[in-house]
Amino acid sequence: MNYEIDITFEGDHVLVRTAGEKNYAVVEEIWSRIARVCEKHQCFNVLGIANTTQPIEAVEGYELPGVFAAHNIDQRYRLAWVERNPEGVDMIDLVVSILKNRDLPGRRFETVDEAKEWLLGSG
């Protein structure tokens, strides 16, 4: 499995950059690390920028609420996500829909600027 994860605290948000193949284990690692950084800095605004070469399977998307619950990712969080690979967009949209149906936060954006404006503005 080839993937990269870089997570940094930017002062007013946590910046997450991911690239490569995704599966349940990778997604679990990403959200575990995001939760640790957010808790450490008491900042729950998350800007994700992904370039996914192989998205997770749809069935794994339905397991994400459990991953979020395991890491206490709840309504404190605002998650703005940009997927740079058009082939990964449908899966992100499915995940956003699943999260929304469970009253968990998250939106997908076309551009980083739009995501940042929503995340850090009144959105």
Image (cartoon, rainbow, N blue to C red):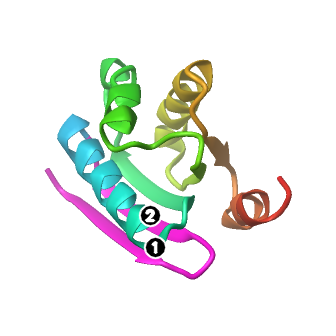
Pick the front one: 118 or 103: 103
Residue at 74 percent across and 67 percent down: it is 113
Amino acid type for the residue under numbered disc 2: Cys
Q: CA distance from mark 2 to mark 1?
A: 5 Å
Residue lying farthest right?
Answer: 122
Amino acid type for the residue under numbered disc 1: His
Which residues lie in the magenta part? 1-22
Pick the front one: 49 or 116: 116
Pick the front one: 103 or 18: 103
Task: Indicate the quadrant where residue 68 lies.
Answer: top left
> Residue beneath label 2, please?
38
Residue at 60 percent across and 39 percent down: it is 105
Q: Determine whether, in the image, residue 19 is placed left or right of residue 23.
A: right
The number of numbered badges drawn on the structure is 2
Give coordinates of residue 52: x percent, y percent. Answer: 39, 50
Q: Is residue 46 visible?
A: no
SS type, badge 1: helix
Q: Determine whether, in the image, residue 95 is placed left or right of residue 107.
A: left
Task: Indicate the quadrant where residue 28 lies.
Answer: top left
SS type, badge 2: helix
Give coordinates of residue 79: x percent, y percent. Answer: 58, 50
Q: Is residue 109 visible?
A: yes
> Residue beneath label 1, please?
41
